[in-house]
Image: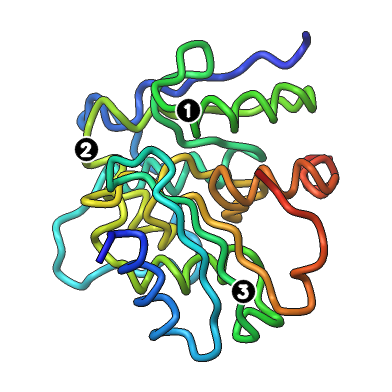
Amino acid sequence: MSDAENIKQRIEAAIPGAHAEVEDYTGGGDHFRATVTAEAFAGLGRVAQHRLVYEILGAEIGGAIHALSLTTRTPSQTNSSQTN
Amino acid sequence: MSSQPHPLPMIGSEPDSVPASGGEPGPAGETRTAGADSNPIREALSEAIEKHKVILFMKGTPEAPACGFSARTVAMLQALDAPFAAVDILPDPRIRQELSAISDWPTIPQLFVGGELIGGCDIVTEMYESGELAQALL
């Protein structure tokens, strides 16, 4: 299992109903880009949404995971703007 | 460009030289572990976050960012002509540890406006693109 797949599965397991897309954008296994869509984000500010995801990965953020570029959305936001 | 970045290299570089917080209590709600060693770095960080309307904790300096995420965040603030204070977290690993303990945020950069964590590079980017960042910096 690739690291990106592992991160995806952990996020989806930890946040009920979440859909995560995770990409290892350097191929080096330590820089990832993730877009997480979850109803659980509704009503939360962006900081709280990101914290939910960071908490799943714990100390790996800044450790084995050098960078995790994160976009969080609720299902109703998925059709809105896409960032690079 | 009128916005002159305002580096704060003193934080953490010389713990003894961090100015004592003139008898002022920490902000309400500041948690402190009972019996834990007093923590000048954490106090200096809290003070800096309170004192500066816009403060960016980054790797490197605005003039010489040491990380692409920090560089992008600086560039967005500069594009909005927003004056901001900046703190390089690299000189002492304790700065980052204490900052993350205060902010409950694991990554760098971290942008604070009005004492509140706005977010890291991703959130700042989204807010820049949507115009919310310009609003928040007013």
Separation of marks 2 and 1 at Cα, in angstroms: 19 Å
Relative horizontal placement of residue B3, taking residue B40 as reference (left or right)? right
Tell me the chain of label 1: B
* Residue A66 quadrant: top left
The residue beneath circle 2 is B93
Looking at the rendered image, the quarter that the N terminus of chain A falls into is: bottom left
First in sequence: mark 2 or mark 1? 1
Q: Is disc 3 surrounded by few (<14), some (14 to 19) or many (20+) residues within 10 Å? A: many
* Residue B87 quadrant: top left
Residue at image coords 57%, 62%: A35
Tag 1: amino acid: Gly
Question: Tag 2, which secondary structure?
Answer: helix
- Discs 2 and 3 share one subunit: no
Where's residue B16, x and y in %? 20, 30
Separation of marks 2 and 3 at Cα, in angstroms: 33 Å
The residue beneath circle 3 is A37
Q: How many numbered marks have been drawn onto this rendered protein structure?
A: 3
- Circle 2/circle 1 CB separation < 8 Å: no
Residue at image coords 56%, 69%: A36
The residue beneath circle 1 is B68
- Discs 1 and 3 share one subunit: no
- Circle 1/circle 3 CB separation < 8 Å: no
Tag 3: amino acid: Thr
